[in-house]
Amino acid sequence: MIEVRDLKKSFGPVPVLQGVTFTVQKGEAVVIIGASGGGKSILLKHLIGLITPDQGEVCIDGRSMAGLNERQLLQIRRKFGMLFQGAALFDSLNVEQNIGFILDREQNHPPGEIAQRVAEVLELVGLAGIGKKWPAELSGGMRKRVGLARAIIYHPEILLYDEPTTGLDPIAADAIDQLIARVGDTFKITSIAVTHDMRSARRIGRRILMLHQGRIYADEPPDDMFKSSDPVIHRFVNGIYEPGEQFSL
């Protein structure tokens, strides 16, 4: 369903992606891990055509995104939903307006249908009855759930998650992980998540890709990744810092 071929991207003299290649099959749940500043979020933006690669290509359902105009890109982006790191809710809209925003903007859905679909996804994410609340009234975990409801209301084929548990306490993070798994099972959605949270990676991924030095360093099932004796993998997944090591804060 998704194929990334030899993707390269630099910003000025700084190389970020240096030949990333991988595939994701329909219905898979894939997690991408790697160091801060290593290009994980940049990679997600390539998947939906927000960034153009310096070299290589991204194919969605066999269609290359290279050279597409904005209208053609919008057709491909319609396959995607995305949960942003900070949920990215509109502060000037209440919860139900945030969730129904894309349907309202399309202007081809009667108001009653939009309200019904908003209510359905709010119930799915465990927030029934909060449609009139404002983003400022929500906890971090609730904002993430509203962001996820907005991402799934138009039934995308692919869901992207950018650090879905960042800023949440362990219990709220576990609830979000369970919700992500339930959404994937309910809608048979292909999902790709980038995360620093190793517990989350293990819970929601059926495959884990490790991005290291601009390339896919490892591609393993979770159990194999976390049992790996490779020193680069072992140190990262277990959070082991070597004195003198260079890293990004």
Image: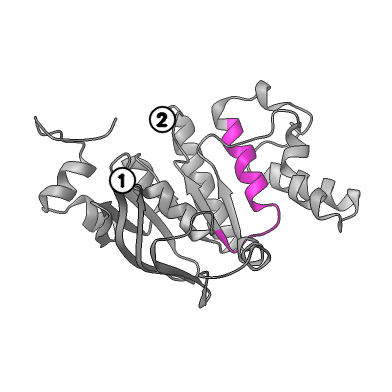
| Amino acid of disc 2 | Pro
Residue at the outermost front position? 12
Q: Residue at x 61, y 66 (%)?
A: 76
Residue tagged 2: 170
Mark closer to the observer (2, 1): 1
User: What number is the disc on residue 148?
Assistant: none
The disc, 2 or 1, on the residue closer to the chain's N-terminal end is: 1
**Looking at the picture, which amino acid does disc 1 mark?**
Gly
Crowdedness near tag 1: few (<14), some (14–19) or many (≥20) residues, C-alpha within 10 Å: many
Could you say where residue 27 lies in the image, as x and y percent from the top left? 50, 67
- How many C-alpha atoms fall within 10 Å of the one at disc 2: few (<14), some, or many (≥20)? few
Which residue bears the numbered disc 1?
38
Front position in the image: 178 or 196: 196
Residue furthest to the bottom in view is 62
- Residue 9 is drawn in which quadrant? bottom left
- Tell me what residue is drawn at x 78 percent, y 50 percent: 117
- The residue range painted magenta reads 142-158
Give how far apart the Cα atoms at labels 2 and 1 are: 25 Å
Above or below residue 212? Residue 87 is above
Q: Is the magenta stretch mostly helix, strand or loop?
A: helix
